[in-house]
Image (spheres, grey):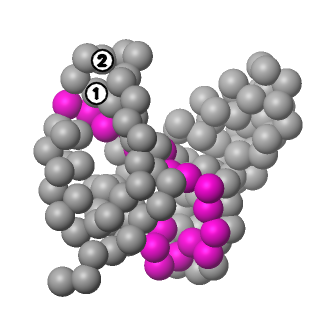
Amino acid sequence: MPGLIVAIVMKKIKNDLRVNLYEKSYHKCAFLKEVSKKLNLNTEIIQKDIFSIKNIETGTIMSRAFKPMPVILNLVNENFKKYKNIIFFMGSSGRKILNETLQEWDLDYEEKKSLTSNDSFVLNIKKIKKKIS
């Protein structure tokens, strides 16, 4: 869903950035395609399980309530060949999640305060590296 919002914003500011939306559910893909078509958005809807695709090259990866942060970091580490950054929308338990994640991962990140909630923040991660245990 955040990808649709990004695509709408890109259209509004007249940016031709293409937004790739990965979704394994047929019904959710149908919804994403219908909205994209009706709003004439620059999207590509890819009906595949993102965990089964290897060597993905992309710009920004966004995640909101998709999977736990360590699972997403593993996915990016294993399946993405190239990316610019990863955006995480962190809720009220975000600080605890981030601290736990930093036990297993070295992250080069910037933190921004949420505009919608004092308890939330946004992480912009540039590099990830799994710590050797």
| Image quadrant containing the C terminus | bottom left
Q: Are marks 2 and 1 in contact (CB under 8 Å)?
A: yes
Q: Who's the residue at 40% across and 29% down the image?
A: 112
Please tell me in which quadrant of the rendered image residue 116 appears: top left
The residue shown at (60%, 30%) is: 5
Residue 100 placed where, x, y %? Answer: 15, 56
In the rendered structure, the answer to whether residue 18 lies left or right of residue 75 reads: right
Q: Is residue 119 above or below residue 16?
A: above
109, above or below 55, in the image: above
Query: What type is the residue that disc 2 sits on?
Result: Ser
Q: Secondary structure at mark 2?
A: loop
Magenta span contains residue 84: yes
Q: Which mark is residue 117?
A: 2
Q: Nearer the viewer, residue 129 or 37?
A: 129
| Residue 89 within the segment the image draws in magenta | yes
Q: Residue at x 59, y 80 (%)?
A: 54
The picture places residue 40, in percent across and down from the top left corner, at 83, 31
Q: Which residues are magenta?
A: 76-92
Q: Which mark is residue 72?
A: none
> Does dot 1 land on a helix, a strand or a loop?
loop
Measured in 3D between alpha carbons, the distance from the residue under mark 2 to the one under mark 1, in whole angstroms, is 5 Å
Q: Which residue is at a point 47% across and 78% down the rendered structure image?
A: 78
- Label 1 amino acid? Ser
| Residue on which the image places disc 1 | 120
